[in-house]
Amino acid sequence: MHRLFVQFSIILSLCIVQISVGIAACLGGQMNTGWCWPTKLGDWSTYLGWHGDNPSFDTPHLAQDIKAAENDPVYAVANGLVLIVREDVSRYGGAKDCTTNGKNVSIPGAGIVIRHYTSYGDPVDVLYAHLKNVQVKKNDTVEPGDVIGYIRNYTWCGSRMDHLHFGVAFPGRDISVYGKDGSQRDVWPGYAEEDKGFINPVLFFSDHSVGNTFSCDPIKERCSFRVRDSVGWFPPVDSCDNATQWYIVGKTTDGENYLMGSSDRSVCRRIPVACYPN
């Protein structure tokens, strides 16, 4: 009996440690509206701003390029759910030469899309790009100031311009566009004739305060849930107890899951007790 108690205590301690890991601060400082700055620079210093004109492209810029140095950490601006991660987005690594065979030679780089929420519970999808050494994966949850990746070398036409490509899609897109590899053109564009759902990041973060928690309204948006047996929860963290919203789940005659109604944390008791590390 004593040995079982000791083993249970060790498992419980490990769970507590894993839940505690990742709690961070806004190491780049905070904006006036409560969001963390995504880089240690802590301001909007930029190479190219929203709708800026780049002679290498013939359409407007759909993000804010925040100056940074290679290997600088990139921080999550708030609590969020990682919707998509790709290491191989075309041109997100820059280009070696802009004249080879008369065409741009693009180098792939990493891009991450994270869903955050405003103080009104509205979803906003933030694109962090020109990255390397990505620290998160799809369906991970992040906290304010968590390091999600690092700035990579960005050289374009012989000019060194290391920076964070910082795009804001608001309101948040239908989550179906982030399925599979997230290869849809509207997810990753740095330049386009149309804004494709992106808005001016500077104005967005000036006009919208940060939300304190996750929220998800299945009636208004498609949400990414974790489902086990007859219980569903959001965000889709591994442990039911660590979620913020809970639902009763049923199955159609075709075996598809559907939400029968909202509930509270007590539904987690229906799941066998276990430690599910994130």
Image (spheres, rainbow, N blue to C red):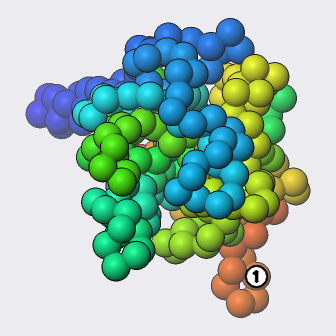
Q: Is residue 190 left or right of residue 105?
A: right
* Relative image position of residue 48 (x, y in whole percent): 57, 36
Q: Residue at x 57, y 21 (%)?
A: 44
Residue placed furthest toward the right: 219
Image position of 28 with respect to 9: above or below: above
Could you say where residue 200 lies in the image, as x and y percent from the top left?
74, 37
Quadrant location of the N terminus in the rendered image? top left
Residue toward you, 190 or 86: 190
Name the residue at 42% across, 36% down. 163
Q: Residue at x 51, y 42 (%)?
A: 165
**Residue 211, quarter of the rendered image:** top right
Name the quadrant of the C terminus.
top left
**Quadrant of residue 221 within the rendered picture:** bottom right
Classed neighbour count for the residue bearing mark 1: other residues with Cα under 10 Å, few (<14), some (14–19), many (≥20): few
Residue 247 seen in the current view: no
Horizontal side of 17 relative to 138 (left or right) equals: left
Disc 1 is placed on an element classified as loop
Name, please, the residue furthest toward the bottom. 254
Q: Residue furthest left?
A: 3
* Residue drawn at 49 percent across, 15 percent down: 42
For disc 1, the marked residue is 252
- Residue 75 visible in image: yes
Tell me the kind of residue under disc 1: Thr
Q: From the top left corner, tell me how far across and down residue 15 is, in percent.
A: 32, 34
* Residue 139 vertical position relative to residue 152 in the rendered view, above or below: below
Q: Nearer the viewer, residue 1 or 110?
A: 110
Tally of numbered discs: 1
Question: Which percent across, then down, holds residue 183?
Answer: 54, 72
